[in-house]
Image (spheres, coloured by chain):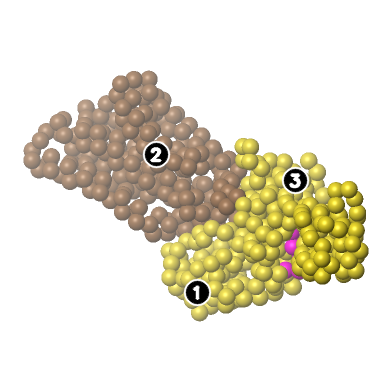
Chain colours: A yellow, B brown
Amino acid sequence: MTTISADQAVGTPTAVTSTLDLAGVSRWYGNVVAVNDVSMSLGPGVTGLLGPNGAGKTTLLHMMAGFLAPSRGVVTLDGRPTWRNPEVYRRLGLVSEREAVHTFLTAYEFVLASAKLHRLPDPAGAARRAIAQVEMEGAQDRRIATYSKGMRQRARVAAALVHEPQVLLLDEPFNGMDPRQRLHMMELLHRLGDAGRTILFSSHILEEVEQVSGTVQVMVAGRLAASGDFRTIRRLMTNRPHVFTVHSTDDRALAVALMAEASVTGVELGRAGLTVRAGDYGAFTRVLPKIALRMGIRVRQLVPEDESLESVFSYLVEA
Amino acid sequence: MSTVSWITLRGLFGRRRFLLLLPLPVVLIVLAVLSRSLGVTPHEWAPPVLVGLGLAVVLPVVALIVGTGVLGAEIDDGTVVHILTKPLPRWQIVLPKLAVATGVTAVTVAVPLYAAGLLADSARLGLALAAASAVGALAYSALFLALSLLTRRPVLLGLVYVLIWEGLLGNVVSGTRVLSIQQYVITLADRIAPTELLLGDVSVPVAAVMSALISVGFTVLAIDRLRSFSVAGETS
C-alpha cells in the first residue's frame, strides 16, 4: 500500500487546512466492483463529486469518511488512515445521504448532543454558532419531526459543523430541496470553501456542481473519469475531438468542403472512406448535411467512432 | 449521565416499541396475584409463573426488545452515524448502551419478579429473583447488543436463541443448559434464596463464571465489531 503526499493539494496544508488523499482505492462487493482504482487529493475549497447514479460516489464517500474499508488502496486524512480511526472525526464531518435524524430531539438538542460527544469546551456556544451558520435559529427549539426535508438537512449540516471540521463530506446534499433551500445550501458551501475548509459534495446533477464548485471529480462506473477545474472539464467534454467515419458518393469533394469548416480539425481520405475529426460535435453534425446538400453529395453512412464515451458524456450533460 | 446514554434513553423511550415492554411484566404480576388470592399453593403456581413465565419469557423477551433497541434500532434507521462520526473510542459507545440496556431490562423485570417472589414465598425469594435477573439482564443485553452488530436480523436470531435453544433444546438436551442464561439465573436465584420452588440444572460456579464470560465476551466482540462498522452501500 502506498500513501501519497499532500504536496498535490491546493496550497500546503497548515494547522488550519486538511488534505484528504485517496491512493489506488478500490472497493468490490463479491464480483461487483463499485469503486475501481481511484486516486485523488482533496485540498481546501469546494469540490464536486459528479457522476450518474450507481457510479460509486456513495461508496467512495463512505470510504473517505471511514465507514467502509477499501478492498485495496488507502484513504488518509493528513496522512492518517480514516478506516478504524475515530480520531479523524476531530477534523472531519459527514452529512450522509440517508435522511437519518433523531426526530424526537429539537435541532438545538441534536446539535448540542453532537457538540458534547465531541467534548467541546463550550458545547452550548458551539451549538448556537453551528445553528446560526445554517440560519436555523428560529426553529431550533422545535422537534426535528416537525421539519421539512430541507430544514432537516440543515440541522444535520449544523451537527456536522459543530466542531468546525476542516473537511466536510456531503452525500447528495441537494436531494429533495426546493430551489430556495438549494440556493441557501450552495451559499453555505461557498462560504465554507472560501474560509479554507475542504468541502466535498456528491451530485448526479451537472448544474448543481456547476453552480457550487470550481473543482470537480467525475466518476463513471466506479472509475474516476475526469478530475480538475470544472470549466476545463466541461470544455473537454463538449469540445474534445470526435472522430467520425463518413461514406459518401464523392469522398474527395466532401473532404475539401469539410476542411473549410471551423468545426472540423482534420480529414483523412482512405479506402474505408473519410475519417473526420471534429472539434465540436454539435456543429459538425449540423453542418455536414448542409454541405452535402449544397454540393449534391449523398452521405451513405456516418459512424461516430467513440460511441461509448459519447454516451457517457451525453448522460452527464442530460442528467 | 453520558451523552450516549442520554440519546440512547431518549431513543428507547421515544419509540413506540417501548410500549411492548409493559404487557409481559403486568401479566406476571396479575397471574401471581390471582394465584395467591385464589388460594392455589405456591408449589403449584410458583414454578410455572416464576420460571416458566418470569425467567423463561419475560426476562429474555424484555432484554431482547431493549438490547436490540439500544443500538440495532439506530443502525436500522441510520442515526447511528451521528454517534459514530465522533472521536470517541468505540468502548465509550458500547458500554453506555450496554448499561442502559441492562438497567432498563433489570428494572422492568426485577419489579414484577420481586412482587411474584414475595407472593410465592418470601421477600428473600423476591430479592433473589430480582438480583439474579439483573445478572441475567446483563448477560442477555451483552448478547443481544453484539447480535445487532453481527447480523441484520438480531431480533430473529435472539428469538431463536431464547425460544429454540433455551426453551426447546434446554428441556430435551441437558447439555445445552450449560449455555443457557436462563439456567444461570435460576441457579443464582436458588443459591441466594434456597427454596423448593426453583430447581437449577447447572452448578453455581458454572452459572457465575459463564454469566461473566458471556457478558464480557460479547461486550468485547461488540466493541470490536463497532470499530469496523460499515455503512451498507444503498445507492451503489
The residue lying at 16 percent from left, 30 percent from top is B43
Q: Nearer the viewer, residue A223 or A284?
A: A284
- Find numbered disc 1 in the image and state the secondary structure of the residue it sits on: loop
Asked whether the viewer can see residue B133, the reply is yes
Q: Is A263 included in the stretch rendered in magenta?
A: no
> Are dots 1 and 2 on a single chain?
no
Residue position for label 2: B156
State how far apart marks 3 and 1 are (Cα): 43 Å
Q: With respect to residue A156, does B160 lie above or below?
A: above
Where A35 falls versus A187 (above or below)? above
Among the 4 quarters of the image, the one containing residue B68? top left
Q: Are marks 3 and 1 on the same chain?
A: yes
- Horizontal relation, residue B89 to residue A258: left or right: left
Chain at numbered mark 2: B
Looking at the rendered structure, the kind of residue marked 3 is Asp
Disc 3 crowd rating (10 Å Cα; few below 14, some 14-19, many 20+) is some
| Residue numbers of the magenta segment | A212-217
Residue at 72% in and 59% down = A313
Mark 3, residue position: A37
Where in the figure is residue A192, as x and y percent of width and height? 69, 71
The residues tagged by marks 1 and 2 sit, at their Cα atoms, a distance apart of 39 Å
Crowding at dot 1, Cα within 10 Å, few <14 / some 14-19 / many 20+, comes out as some
Point out residue B78 in the picture as x, y percentages from the top left corner: 51, 54
Q: Which residue is mark 1?
A: A140
Residue A93 appears left or right of B41: right
